[in-house]
């Protein structure tokens, strides 16, 4: 079914050429309403009843969703044309930008996978007597409360909630499934006459709860505590912070949808081989500790994962990929925005990547400031750290002249900057963060001339993130051959000191991507640069410390081929002539052992060093005093033999 654009000019303040927009987008448009959310609601009802409409209004989303729910109609798609494209100090044509935004809104993006998390409202409150008891009194009607007091102060006698004493030793988990261990655990017991006492202390007492309210004023129980669902922490000296934490905790009862942010491919992981640690990018970057080693790969606890997306953008092999939405869907959105804008006659489009905070800045700027330039196209994403160098390169290759990123408070700026630096080195284009919460500064920065040109012939690569990065880089820098990259880049060459390398080939057996290989017919170490992850495993396992790295992007065809890093003359067996081993190695062994080691004193024994496996076994078999020529070994005597001999006598 063809989607219909439902237009409104917001009381004449946002003029829209519906005919031009319909021609550019290929979609039918409604008449341009003036007050769709008020006097013309009957038209909104008809559009909702018909279904498959795109309401080009971001301000009244809640109203139209409520109307759809009342009608029993499916929720429509929404698009903020007014704040993002209409209200602007730029006098240029708005049709190309509107067309791009409509094209993106028309995409069908699969919903993120999720799992149900059930919280029964079992709440553990940590803290000293006064703030903890105050919180318990306020939460007792909403949650099943237990207060853990860590000192010996007196506690009120009450049956409205439980009070225990002890010291919290460990806490693990997230909303609906916290595991706690308590030392010195004492439960309250009651006696006749309304008196109370505590049981004898017990160490390593284990329990579960759904919610933790931490009012101790001490360091948090978890890394990145603001991202741990079900864990609420407040400074007990701040009444406002405590009240906010109590309010948030009171709503944590029921069934909640927990998005499954990432998907993993353990076989691609380059974390470890043979107990040697390689790539640790995701573990180092994870703010919540959701990523932990698991043998030769890493595992991710989906209940702890906060969905920041840094692991996906940093993973060199694709073993971890963001899935809410999937990486290929984000690439598709970028390419759709650029293509629709250019096809509608726009020139030099510029990309602005924002989160929810950035979207609010745009709305404020549109209402009270300059708004956005006509060629700046906003792309809103759930987690900004999911935008890595591959996505940036894909956007530039698709036709964007530059990229501007507005970070949110939850964005890891160091990781974002490292990805910007890598994308800049690969593309040679302008990429920057606009780190401000001032809408006027945001507008002023974007209205300033960028001084860069977009790619004349856009390219829209597909495939894995590594394939997209390489193809996009070739499109952006067609004359480049080898580009130097920052330290830590996931692309580069393996350099071998041929004087130190003995061609033991230990590196080959541990290479997780198959970038290093051998030649079954000759002593050779081969390397395919395009496959190298720069994970560090081969350098760590090399017994001669002969391997180093050079971060770079090799855009020539040699990166796709196997090249020989080191080779030597093979040694021919002195008996059968079969090639085996490396000549220099056999010569060194012969020099060190022949006539000097007890096993190789005689010339005949020394010759065996220079034989292949088959000939060596044959020579040992036919040699004098060889172990195979001996008679049958005597039968071992056992306890039964001694006992039977004693019985016979």
Image (cartoon, rainbow, N blue to C red):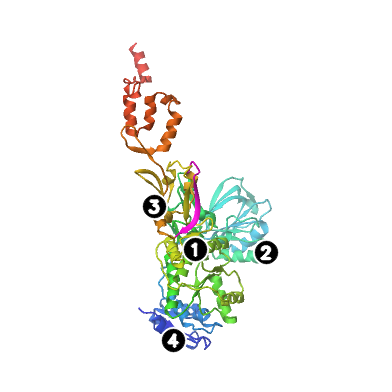
At which x and y percent is residue 524?
39, 45
Give the alpha-carbon distance from disc 1 to disc 3, as whole Å: 23 Å
Residue drawn at the location 49% of the way across and 41% of the way down: 544
- Foreground: disc 4 or disc 3: 3
Q: Quadrant of the C terminus?
A: top left
Residue toward you, 567 or 385: 567
Q: Is residue 192 left or right of residue 14?
A: right
Rendered image quadrant of residue 25 = bottom left
- Foreground: disc 1 or disc 2: 1
Give the alpha-carbon distance from disc 1 to disc 2, as whole Å: 48 Å
Q: Judging from the image, what secondary structure is the residue with disc 4 in?
A: helix
**Residue bearing mark 1:** 426
> Does any portion of residue 75 appear in the rendered image?
no
Q: Is residue 165 left or right of residue 16?
A: right
**Residue bearing mark 2:** 238
**Residue bearing mark 4:** 18
Q: Earlier in the sequence, mark 1 or mark 3?
A: 1
Give the alpha-carbon distance from disc 4 to disc 1, as whole Å: 41 Å
Q: Are marks 1 and 3 in contact (CB under 8 Å)?
A: no
Q: Is residue 414 left or right of residue 463?
A: right
Q: Residues within 10 Å of mark 2 (few under 14, many from 20)?
A: few
Q: Is residue 71 left or right of residue 13?
A: left
Q: Residue furthest front?
A: 569
Disc sitting over residue 562 in the figure = 3
Q: Earlier in the sequence, mark 4 or mark 3?
A: 4
Q: Earlier in the sequence, mark 4 or mark 1?
A: 4
Give the alpha-carbon distance from disc 4 to disc 3, as whole Å: 57 Å
Q: Earlier in the sequence, mark 3 or mark 2?
A: 2
The secondary structure that most of the magenta stretch takes on is: strand
């Amino acid at each position: 079914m063809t989607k219909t654009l439902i237009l409104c000019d917001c009381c004449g303040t946002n003029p829209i050429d519906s005919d031009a927009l319909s021609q550019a987008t290929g979609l039918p448009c409604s008449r341009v309403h003036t007050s769709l959310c008020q006097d013309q609601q009957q038209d909104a009802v008809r559009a909702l009843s018909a279904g498959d409409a795109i309401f080009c209004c971001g301000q009244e989303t809640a109203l139209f969703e409520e109307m759809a729910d009342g009608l029993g109609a499916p929720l429509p798609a929404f698009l903020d044309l007014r704040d993002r494209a209409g209200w602007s100090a730029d006098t240029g044509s708005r049709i190309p930008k509107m067309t791009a935004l409509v094209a993106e809104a028309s995409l069908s993006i699969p919903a993120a996978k999720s799992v149900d998390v059930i919280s029964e409202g079992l709440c553990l409150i940590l803290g000293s007597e006064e703030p903890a008891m105050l919180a318990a009194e306020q939460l007792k009607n909403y949650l099943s409360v237990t207060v853990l007091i860590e000192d010996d102060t007196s506690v009120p006698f009450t049956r409205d909630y439980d009070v225990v004493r002890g010291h919290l030793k460990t806490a693990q988990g997230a909303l609906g499934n916290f595991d706690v261990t308590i030392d010195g655990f004492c439960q309250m017991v009651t006696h006749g006459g309304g008196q109370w006492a505590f049981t004898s202390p017990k160490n390593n007492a284990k329990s579960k709860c759904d919610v933790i309210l931490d009012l101790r004023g001490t360091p948090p129980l978890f890394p990145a505590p603001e991202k741990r669902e079900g864990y609420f922490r407040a400074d007990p000296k701040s009444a406002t912070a405590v009240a906010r934490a109590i309010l948030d905790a009171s709503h944590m009862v029921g069934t909640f949808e927990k998005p499954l942010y990432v998907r993993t491919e353990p076989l691609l992981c380059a974390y470890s081989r043979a107990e040697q640690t390689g790539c640790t990018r995701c573990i180092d970057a994870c703010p919540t500790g959701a990523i932990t080693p698991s043998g030769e790969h890493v595992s991710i606890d989906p209940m702890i994962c906060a969905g920041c997306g840094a692991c996906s953008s940093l993973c060199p092999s694709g073993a971890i990929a963001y899935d809410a939405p999937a990486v290929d869907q984000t690439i598709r959105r970028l390419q759709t925005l650029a293509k629709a804008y250019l096809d509608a006659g726009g020139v030099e489009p510029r990309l602005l990547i924002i989160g929810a905070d950035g979207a609010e800045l745009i709305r404020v700027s549109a209402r009270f400031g300059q708004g956005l330039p006509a060629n700046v196209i906003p792309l809103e994403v759930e987690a900004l750290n999911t935008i890595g160098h591959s996505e940036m390169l894909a956007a530039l290759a698709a036709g964007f002249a530059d990229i501007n990123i507005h970070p949110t408070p939850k964005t890891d700026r160091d990781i974002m900057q490292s990805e910007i630096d890598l994308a800049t080195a690969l593309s040679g284009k302008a990429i920057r963060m606009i780190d401000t919460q001032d809408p006027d500064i945001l507008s002023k920065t974007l209205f300033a001339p960028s001084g860069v040109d977009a790619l004349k012939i856009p390219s829209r690569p597909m495939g894995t993130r590594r394939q997209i990065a390489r193809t996009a880089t070739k499109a952006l820098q067609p004359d480049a051959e080898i580009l130097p990259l920052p330290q830590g880049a996931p692309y580069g060459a393996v350099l071998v000191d041929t004087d130190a390398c003995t061609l033991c080939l230990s590196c080959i057996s541990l290479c997780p991507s198959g970038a290093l290989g051998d030649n079954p017919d000759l002593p050779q170490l081969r390397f395919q640069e395009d496959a190298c992850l720069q994970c560090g495993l081969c350098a760590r396992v090399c017994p001669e410390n002969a391997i180093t790295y050079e971060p770079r992007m090799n855009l020539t065809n040699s990166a796709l081929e196997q090249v020989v890093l080191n080779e030597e003359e093979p040694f021919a067996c002195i008996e059968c002539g079969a090639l085996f081993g490396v000549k220099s190695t056999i010569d060194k062994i012969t020099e060190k052992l022949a006539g000097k080691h007890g096993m190789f004193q005689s010339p005949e024994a020394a010759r065996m060093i220079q034989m292949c496996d088959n000939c060596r076994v044959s020579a040992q078999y036919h040699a004098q005093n060889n172990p195979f020529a001996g008679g049958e070994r005597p039968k071992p005597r056992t306890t039964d033999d001694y006992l039977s001999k004693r019985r016979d006598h």
